[in-house]
Amino acid sequence: MVGSCGATAYISHPSCVMHEMGQGHPECPERLAAIQDRLIAAGIWDYLLHVTAQAATREQLLRVHPAAYLDRLAVASPAQGHVHLEPDTVLNPYTLNAAYHGAGAGIQAVDLVMQGKAQNAFCAIRPPGHHAEKEKAFGFCFFK
């Protein structure tokens, strides 16, 4: 993963495809394939700095979320099937792994840019994180 300051980092992880919230849900695994397809069609794919996201550590997540919230998510995570935390936010057995990698992608994006290894970064992750609250999963999102 040696980049140049002019490169755009494309950060993702295979676990992000494993998170799914049920048939017909708009936040679905196919979103990542659609992004990749558009980048390939535009001739951009081969010019990106491809980075496999590392999982955020518990310590990193504790900078934003209280331990009790992280523990509640772990307890709610199902061994099979789905658990609805709210109407639009659903856990499956793979969700938390994907969410930890998604949060880690955001951290890596900042690090790569700050270290001059990339000019900017795009995190192709699921579940997203922009709607999550400090102590509540919300709007498809688990971690800020």
Image (tube, rainbow, N blue to C red):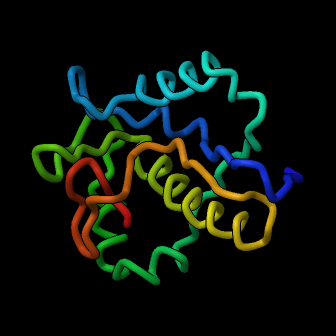
Q: Position of residue 84 (x, y in %)?
A: 17, 45
Give residue 30's quadrant in the image.
Answer: top left
- Residue furthest to the right: 2
Say which quadrant the C terminus sits in.
bottom left
Give the residue at x 50% y 28%: 35
Give residue 45's quadrant in the image.
Answer: top right
Image check: 43 left or right of 128?
Answer: right
- Residue furthest to the top: 41
Q: Is residue 67 above or below residue 138?
A: below
Q: Position of residue 126 (x, y in %)?
A: 43, 43
Image check: 2 left or right of 32?
Answer: right
Give the residue at x 57% y 70%: 57
Image check: 26 left or right of 10?
Answer: left
Q: Is residue 123 above or below residue 74?
A: above
Image check: 141 left or right of 136?
Answer: right
Give the residue at x 65% y 56%: 120
